[in-house]
């Protein structure tokens, strides 16, 4: 499909008003319809040239097939696992994201989760609301001198590492792309995963959800960790095997976990959420006014640039050339 003139854009989730305003100022027709059912999305997408989503809208092959005029899917955020990128590429639909828009918000939430695990702040606050005064029950630990393993050293991982270094934490990490020299420049010693497991007091994951990262923390890796290791996942549900995590919590091998993301959202199995040593949030990593404003502004400007021929940025797929083999 050759890229044509962009005219109508559907925004299927709640975004900062600046997103709509930027698109309209460029002369694009904007249809804002958050909370569409699958059937409603299939109907609305038929005559749209662009679609802007966050993480809730599932842009499946079926949705793409129904979108007769669709040229671009804009993800206001980083992860595109809710978009069938391969199907989009086969149909010649561009997929864009805003990889920097929510980095600081996700990093700050992660740091907050680490602090909450160390001092059991949510549990103590809940206890106070119940009228209790349990000073002895909520004995915590200092972060100073503890070792934090950061798995994934991209934008968010490095922001977490540098902030936690200010608390006196030693930061080690792993990333298959970032070189050890680069990570050393922001204070992270890179090690093979097999050397990381037995050395860390805290683990935080900041990788995309890929076949290679699904179940990165599992029964085998938990067994290699220090007893009482603390785990944070503010990245994607599935990177930490939830069954293995629950077993590690029940045995004491894992001392606590802070989860902002789940394999199924919202989670139907409540065993992890209800565990006394688990802190959980409803996927709040990007839920700040600043992040939503940045993501909305960035994706709108990227689509306007595409519509006006100024260039393409944030592209994670490209239109397939006719009869060319599909590559990623």
Image: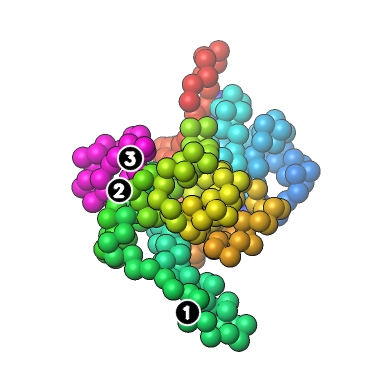
Report whether 245 appears left or right of 172.
Answer: right
Q: Which residue is mark 3?
A: 195
Residue 78 tag number: none
Under circle 2, the secondary element is strand
> Which is more N-terminal, label 3 or label 2?
2
Query: Label 2 belongs to which residue?
Result: 172
Q: Residues within 10 Å of mark 1 (few under 14, many from 20)?
A: few
- Look at discs 2 and 3 and give the one toward the viewer: 3
Q: Nearer the viewer, residue 138 or 83?
A: 138
Q: Viewed as shown, does residue 235 lie left or right of 108?
A: right
Q: Quadrant of residue 74?
A: top right
Please state if 196 lies on the left or on the right of 98 as rendered.
Answer: left
Q: Which residues are magenta?
A: 172-196
Marks 1 and 2: which is nearer the front?
A: 1
Who comes first in sequence, dot 3 or dot 1? 1
Q: Position of residue 319 (x, y in %)?
A: 52, 26
Sequence-first tag of 1 and 2: 1
Is residue 319 one of those drawn in magenta? no
- Labelled disc at residue 136: 1
* Residue 314 shows in this picture: yes
Q: Tell me what residue is drawn at x 29 percent, y 40 percent.
A: 191
């Amino acid at each position: 499909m050759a890229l044509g003139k962009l005219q109508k854009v559907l925004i299927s989730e709640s975004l900062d008003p600046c997103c709509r305003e930027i698109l309209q100022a460029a002369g694009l027709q904007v249809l804002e319809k958050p909370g569409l059912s699958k059937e409603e999305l299939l109907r609305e997408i038929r005559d749209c040239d662009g679609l802007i989503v966050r993480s809730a809208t599932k842009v499946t092959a079926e949705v793409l097939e129904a979108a007769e005029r669709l040229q671009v899917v804009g993800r206001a955020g980083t992860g595109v696992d809710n978009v069938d990128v391969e199907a989009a590429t086969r149909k010649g639909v561009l997929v864009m994201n805003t990889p920097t828009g929510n980095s600081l918000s996700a990093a700050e939430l992660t740091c907050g989760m680490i602090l909450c695990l160390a001092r059991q702040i949510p549990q103590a606050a809940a206890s106070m609301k119940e009228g209790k005064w349990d000073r002895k029950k909520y004995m915590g630990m200092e972060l100073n001198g503890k070792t934090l393993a950061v798995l994934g050293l991209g934008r968010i991982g490095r922001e977490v590492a540098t902030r936690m270094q200010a608390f006196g934490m030693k930061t080690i990490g792993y990333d298959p792309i970032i070189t050890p020299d680069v990570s050393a420049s922001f204070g992270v010693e890179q090690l093979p995963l097999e050397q990381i497991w037995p050395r860390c007091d805290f683990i935080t994951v900041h990788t995309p959800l890929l076949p290679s990262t699904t179940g990165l923390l599992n029964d085998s890796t938990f067994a290699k960790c220090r007893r009482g290791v603390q785990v944070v996942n503010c990245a994607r549900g599935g990177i930490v095997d939830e069954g293995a995590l629950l077993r590690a919590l029940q045995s004491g091998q894992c001392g606590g976990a802070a989860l902002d993301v789940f394999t199924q959202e919202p989670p139907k199995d409540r065993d992890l959420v209800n565990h006394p040593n688990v802190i959980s949030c409803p996927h709040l990593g990007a839920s700040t006014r600043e992040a939503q404003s940045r993501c909305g502004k960035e994706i709108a400007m990227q689509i306007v640039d595409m519509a006006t021929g100024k260039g393409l940025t944030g592209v994670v797929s490209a239109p397939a050339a006719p009869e060319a083999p599909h590559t990623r």
